[in-house]
Amino acid sequence: MGDNEKLLLARARNGDISAFESLIEGYQKKVFNIALRMIGDYEDANDLAQEVFIRIYKSIKGFKEQSSFSTWVYRITTNVCLDELRKRKNKNVVSLDDDIKFDDSEMKRQVEDVKPTPEAVVERDETRRIVSDAISKLSSEHRTAIILRDIQGFSYEEISRIINCPEGTVKSRINRARKALKEILKSKKELLSEQYVK
Amino acid sequence: MESCKEINELIPLYAGGELGEGQRSRLEEHIKGCRACKDELEDIIYIINLCNDVPEEELPENFRAQLHEKLVREKEKQERTGKVAYLRNKYVKILSTIAAGLLIVALLRGFTNNGLLMTGRGAQNESVESKAVAEAAKSAGMAESGDTEAADVKALQENPEVQSDAGAEAGIMKAPAQTPKADTSRFFPSQRIDNDVRAEEKIINSRSAAITLGTVSSGVEPEEVKELALKCDAELESSAMAQGDAVADGSVSELRFKVPNQRYEELVNLLTASFEQYGVEVGPLNVQDMTQAVNDLESKLIGLEDSIDAAENNKNISSPEELSALKADREKVMAELERIHLNSGYTFVTITIK
């Protein structure tokens, strides 16, 4: 933790909101994107990401600096998203145990397009939409692994600390997650190949 | 020749550049002659590239403003809750502070009346005890202005007699005098310290060493050794202590510690400096590369996870006992991996006392 971050942390612990906002500034975008990929809905991700930071603000006095601040932030992020997925599963809002299927009627736009875009951008967005939707069909365990490693680019060691699992388990989950994603996308490979240049 | 099933397990990790050298060579050798595995590899690389390409979305426009409002509301809520708790606790604290002061007075008067304190010292303590009561009352007064903890600290600081007397009577040991640092550089092979290594290149080692104390003459106390080890954040793992006749016969005591790697050198220097007169022998530091063991365990874990997956999804017919056995094996492998990773931050030191 840098000196500046330590100083902001100390002030945030005393309830200084401005210091807290400066402290979390560098994490906001990544937290939002993790939530977006985990939940698959823009508005819900907005709410969840804010909830992450409220939780951090509430418990910042108890942060003992045994792990790094960033590990703690992303751990809370992952836990908040997994809690939400569990709640949705219990309410049958989203079933995590659906058979792997890929039906156009089930797809919904992940990101609102608020501006008109040129055709090439639309095609690129379509590919990304297909990938995002495929990720949303993974189990919560596989989804977390793919998002943290292949989308957000965390190292195995970082992921191991965030989700509190041995590195071997992390590698195993990523292995299976990639295979599961491949199975989901198999039926769409031709469509993806047209739009995606390797 | 590796089977396709074994290689298939490794493909997703290879595609992400995450395999160790040994496994990488095995895989590359296999796919030279196996079209199916080569196709599988290309598919997985494709998937990873798609994921890498998913763009990072910008924060929603009103994210920061909404969050700020929520933080302000949360802070107000905490302040309201804090005031209620404070008012409730203030009353309790005032009462307990006065009660504590009265108890101190009662005890000291009891000791004095029983002649347990020397006269002069007793007289001194009476003035000290009355200061303690006065300060307790002052703390109670300061609590009304909302500064209870600061008041307690202030009271203690303004009565150094109370503090130092208590310290002397408790027999607090002074810190040992500084001794010249012995030259122990010959015991430490040059190697990178784990903390300096980037996460991706982290070396997984198992480190151990043996130190013998009392090689020239006896007199080393195991308790002294434990105290010194504690200063280096070492944890005692096991001990075998020689007692009574066994000591007279020349038998040894053995203590096994685990010390954080970065404190190992400090421990050796401390032991050498403290027990040099009795004779100290420090064995070489044994460093065993556990990377291959970890790779093997991780491969095994991957295989177990797949078997469990298949069993749970009824792709293979497995009895509940087989599934339980697989899960039990998985737990063992995970525990072993965790143990290796955790222990790689420590050096296990066996100290033999003659």
Image (cartoon, coloured by chain):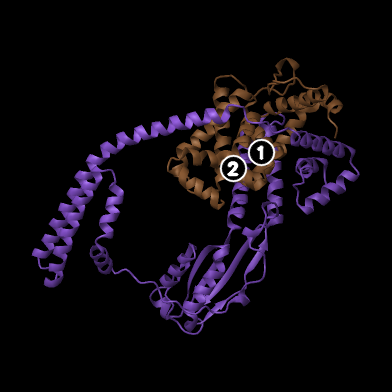
Chain colours: A brown, B purple
> B294 or A157, which lies in front?
A157
Chain letter behind tag 2: A
Above or below A27: residue A183 = above
What is the count of numbered marks? 2
> Can the viewer see residue A139?
no
> A26 or A178, which lies in front?
A26
Say which residue label 2 marks. A162
Say which residue label 1 marks. A148
Q: Residue at position x 56%, y 48% from top?
A: A68
Q: Earlier in the sequence, mark 2 or mark 1?
A: 1
Horizontal and vertical percent for residue B134?
17, 55
Q: Residue at position x 23%, y 65% from top?
A: B161
Horizontal and vertical percent for residue A126?
77, 23
Residues at discs 2 and 1 in contact (Cβ within 8 Å): yes
Q: Callout 1: few (<14), some (14-19), or many (20+) C-alpha neighbours within 10 Å?
A: many
Tell me where residue A118 sits by quadrant: top right
Above or below A114: residue A55 = below
Element assignment for label 1: helix
Looking at the rendered structure, the kind of residue marked 1 is: Leu
Horizontal and vertical percent for residue B133?
17, 55
Above or below B142: residue B107 = below
Residue B124 horizontal side relative to residue A117, left or right: left
Chain letter behind tag 1: A
Element assignment for label 2: helix
Above or below B205: residue B73 = above
> Can the viewer see residue B34?
yes
Looking at the rendered structure, the kind of residue marked 2 is: Ile
Q: Residue at position x 52%, y 70% from top?
A: B267
> B34 or B126, which lies in front?
B126
